[in-house]
Amino acid sequence: MRTLPATRTLPARAPTLALGALAFLAGAACEGPRTYIENSGQHRCFVDGRLETRPALPYRYYGTSRVDALPRDLPSGLPDWELQPVSVPIPQPAPASPWLFPLDFFLEALDRGLHGEPRFVATVELPATPNDLRVEDDVRPTGSENVRVRADAARIAR
């Protein structure tokens, strides 16, 4: 009588390793990289055209986002003409080529496991307005004295 060869069994720790790998992959898949906006001047920031006040934004997409910043108003409510608006691009390269579609998830999970979460940071610093572009606060019309004299003469003539 012939006996069948013994079959191999998985080691006892295999389910633990499989659950650990599954938890690692699920953690990497739950949330993409965040975009951070460093805005120490509390200026109005628009990310891809939408007003954002949060310092950290959840995952948006890979590609290039754009942060447009406008100077905040003065405490009096008037616009601050001392600073110029600025536009800052935030490149967010994909961790793997899109041609590797079925494998890109695993490559991204491996990259995040080895190197941590990538940080995409946009620092908002508005440049000062050059002197030749500054607006004067108190602009008086020229020739107003001549207009007043002519108006007085016209009133006297009537």
Image (cartoon, rainbow, N blue to C red):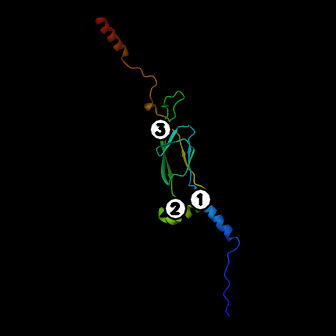
**Circle 1 sits in a helix, a strand or a loop, which is it?**
helix
> What residue is disc 1 on?
28
Q: On the rendered image, what quadrant is the N terminus found in?
A: bottom right
Measuring from the top left, give residue 91's x and y in whole percent.
Answer: 50, 51
**Circle 2 sits in a helix, a strand or a loop, which is it?**
loop
Q: On the rendered image, what quadrant is the C terminus found in?
A: top left
Measuring from the top left, give residue 10's x and y in whole percent.
Answer: 67, 75
Measuring from the top left, give residue 150's x and y in whole percent.
Answer: 32, 11
The part of the image, by quadrant, that contains residue 138 is top left
Callout 2 environment at 10 Å: few (<14), some (14 to 19), or many (20+)? some
Outermost residue on the front side: it is 1
As displayed, is residue 35 above or below residue 129?
below
As displayed, is residue 47 above or below residue 138?
below
- Amino acid type at circle 3 is Pro
Left or right placement of residue 63 versus residue 1 in this view: left
Left or right placement of residue 96 versus residue 11 in this view: left
- Amino acid type at circle 2 is Ala
